[in-house]
Amino acid sequence: MKWKDGRGRCSWCNPNNERYLHYHDEEWGVPVYEDAKLFELLVLESFQAGLSWECVLNKREAFRAAMDGFDPVKVAAYGPERQEALAQNRELIRNRRKIAAAVDNAKVFLEIQNEFGRFSTYLWGWTDGKQQIEQGKTHSVLSDALSADLKRRGMRFVGTTIVYAYLQAVGVIYAHEPGCFLEKST
């Protein structure tokens, strides 16, 4: 694919969507250690199930506004009325099961923070703090194990494929494709 700036990029990146280009070039695969951002991306990845990441990314700002900036304490406290208001918000993905899962997942996220001090400590502990470089996968032994642990703790919409995409998004797994200007070798 020919890019306007002459740089090669991953094949999934839409060259006609500036938001997507920025996400690919500036965020995807960059290690994230801030719990607030880790929670945001966990919620967004869970909403991706059955949809494209581009669809979710295009709604990111609306999600931020509607979900109190992805504050897990606030999201964990959402009752039925607040969840119904989210389900009626036309700017969001209005899947009631995903909305309820976001609330439940916020509660588990807070429990993990309480147990480990930070969610980041829990997450990066799976790789001893080291970034993994992989390409061309949709799941791995790591995503299988992390998915199973999150489910055991009570999270939903965290299957191995979603968790793998999450690990790529937050930089635990670095997966820029061959020919991408951001590709790293193993």
Image (tube, grey):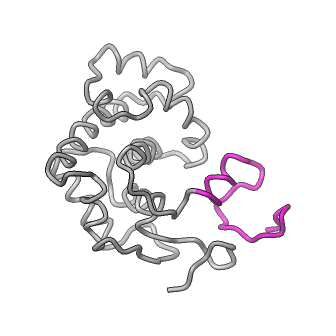
Q: Nearer the viewer, residue 183 or 129?
A: 129
Q: Nearer the viewer, residue 80 or 167?
A: 167
Quadrant housing residue 43: top left
Residue at x 50%, y 26% (from the top left corner): 65
Quadrant housing residue 78: top left
Residue at x 85%, y 61% (from the top left corner): 4
Q: Main secondary structure of the magenta part?
A: loop
Q: How many marks?
A: 0
Quarter containing the N terminus: bottom right
Residue 161 image point, x, y percent: 39, 60
The relative height of residue 166 versus residue 142 in the rendered view (above or below) is above
Quadrant housing residue 31: bottom left
Residue at x 32%, y 51% (from the top left corner): 158
Instruction: Indicate yes or no whether the magenta region holds residue 2.
Output: yes
Left or right: 181, with 124 as reference point:
right
Residue sitting at the far bottom: 186
Residue 33 image point, x, y percent: 38, 57
The relative height of residue 182 versus residue 95 in the rendered view (above or below) is below
Residue at x 33%, y 46% (from the top left corner): 157
The relative height of residue 75 versus residue 34 in the rendered view (above or below) is above
Residue 29 image point, x, y percent: 51, 64
Left or right: 25, with 28 as reference point:
right
Q: Nearer the viewer, residue 125 or 100?
A: 125
Instruction: Indicate yes or no whether the magenta region holds residue 114.
Output: no
Left or right: 172, with 115 as reference point:
right
- Residue bounds of the magenta highlight: 1-26
Residue sitting at the far top: 81
The relative height of residue 150 versus residue 30 in the rendered view (above or below) is above
Residue 68 image point, x, y percent: 42, 27
